[in-house]
Amino acid sequence: MQLYKITVVRPLFLLLALALLAGCGGSSGPNATAPSTPAPLSARNLNLIFVVSEDLAYHAPRDVNPTTANLTNRGLQRSLRMATFLQRQVLGSKNVTGIYVLEPMTHLQTTNNHPDMAAPETVQQFALLNHITLPGEIPPPNVPYTGNSYPLNASYASAVPLPTGVATPAAYCPSCQGLDFSDQEGDNETLVTGIVKANVPGFYVFSAPWETTSGLMANINKLEGYNLTLPASYAGPNYIYAISIAPSGSASLVTFNTNLHPPSTYPVLPAPPPVSTPCAMQSPSVTIEVPDAYASAVIPENINKNETLYIIRHADAHPQPYWSDGNYVCAGQWRALDLPNALRGKISPQQVYSSDPAQISPGFENPWSGVAPSLTVEPYAIANNLPYDLAASFDATSAQATSEFFFNNDTFSGKTVLLAWSYQFIKPTVDSLISSYFQPNASPTAAPAWPPDDYDTVWKVTLDAEGNLTVNNATCEGIDSAALPATCPRF
């Protein structure tokens, strides 16, 4: 499907377009006097709400790191502050109906092809200010629980080609499709026209860069025949656009300006801050050394050298057993935002990795996009100006594939890496690495189990200059899960 874009050809045209925006609640420019904020959108309408995330092409100064293509501290501060405005001023404190974000691997930036994680991070705080009620996944008694943790839909559409370097998902999730940066075969329009045709009133929030957002708004405007005067050009990350469709089918464009001026420092968590504690091991403290302690062990030929991999679990996501929607809950936001402070002086990685949030959250009956690991560790990458990448070229549920990706073929030799992963796959991955030093079915040792309620432990996996392996779980974040508030921090 062709994208219909509005092109600005003369400064006079730009002034006229911005004047039209001002009539819809927008501003004629950053130095203009901002009009009063429009009234919150009506819950009786079907509201398509577009939050423009920042990328290298379209952003405010100092909001995006040109080397990593990730948000800076200032960009993160903007997203945290925008959340409250979006929830109160745009939704009128009503609950969101659906959140759809860019599939990060569809938009690779810089010569190093870093994925675009700014879009999910831009609305993560907002997602946690909304609630969802779900039953526990495993009966009995399967009691419903309401958590402040709205899911982010970020998964790939099954009808279009996958991005280069992305493994075919073990399962597609039509109900949790996200946004494709290039809008292959009109899959973004298919998603949104499906919402319009279902005609369920509510608030549907979309987070993607300007290139994707502007094309999607223009195409929906044309396909549905709304004849709206849309924004002519990028106005900045403070603007939120809404196509509000009344029960009669008539549509209007409403423009909100958050007028945010965020600081450039990393966010300071409000009181009460997370409690710093000594490491209290929930699993047995172990140090495994291979092959030194085992005469039958042999160093694999293709093992990496001089590598250190620190592995953490995603932040707090299960307020009751097996309850999950692929995201973490409010307690997890405290942990994720405190992670740079908690790990300071304990680790010094050169780069950060996680699983692809577009893949399905593992281990549960209901399908969700598995965003929790990536959004747990992204604040650490932002605070430390580190490159951030996704392990998307294999099925993250495969222990052997994960072990081979991180420990074989020299990719990470000489590197120190921080990895966020789903806890149930950490032990099998390390066990697969250990087993590679032995003949098939002959490994005499294994890593300890990772307790399901342990969010604090950090595993350190080291390969020395010869390929000797050491596994140790004595490091921890030092964040007391029991002391984390059940309500989200507010900014």
Image (tube, helix red, strand yellow):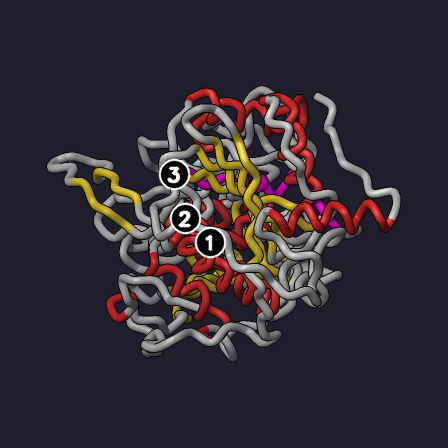
Disc 2 to disc 1: CB gap under 8 Å? yes
Magenta extent: 97-109
Q: CA distance from mark 3 to mark 1?
A: 13 Å
Numbered circle sitting on residue 86: 1
Element at label 2? loop
Element at label 1? helix
Give the image location of residue 205, x and y in percent.
49, 42
Foreground mark, 3 or 1?
Answer: 1
Q: Is residue 31 visible?
A: yes
Q: CA distance from mark 3 to mark 2?
A: 10 Å
Query: Does 315 appear above or below 212?
Result: below
Q: Residue at x 36, y 35 (%)?
A: 44
Disc 1 residue crowd, few under 14, some 14–19, many 20+, Cα 10 Å: many
Disc 3 to disc 2: CB gap under 8 Å? no
Q: As rendered, which of 465 and 294 lies closer to the eye?
A: 465
Can you name the residue that lies furthest to the right here? 10
Disc 2 residue crowd, few under 14, some 14–19, many 20+, Cα 10 Å: many
Q: Residue at x 44, y 68 (%)?
A: 491
Give the image location of residue 487, x and y in percent.
29, 62
Q: Quadrant of the N terminus?
A: top right
Q: CA distance from mark 2 to mark 1?
A: 6 Å
Magenta segment includes 285? no
Numbered circle sitting on residue 97: 3
Numbered circle sitting on residue 91: 2
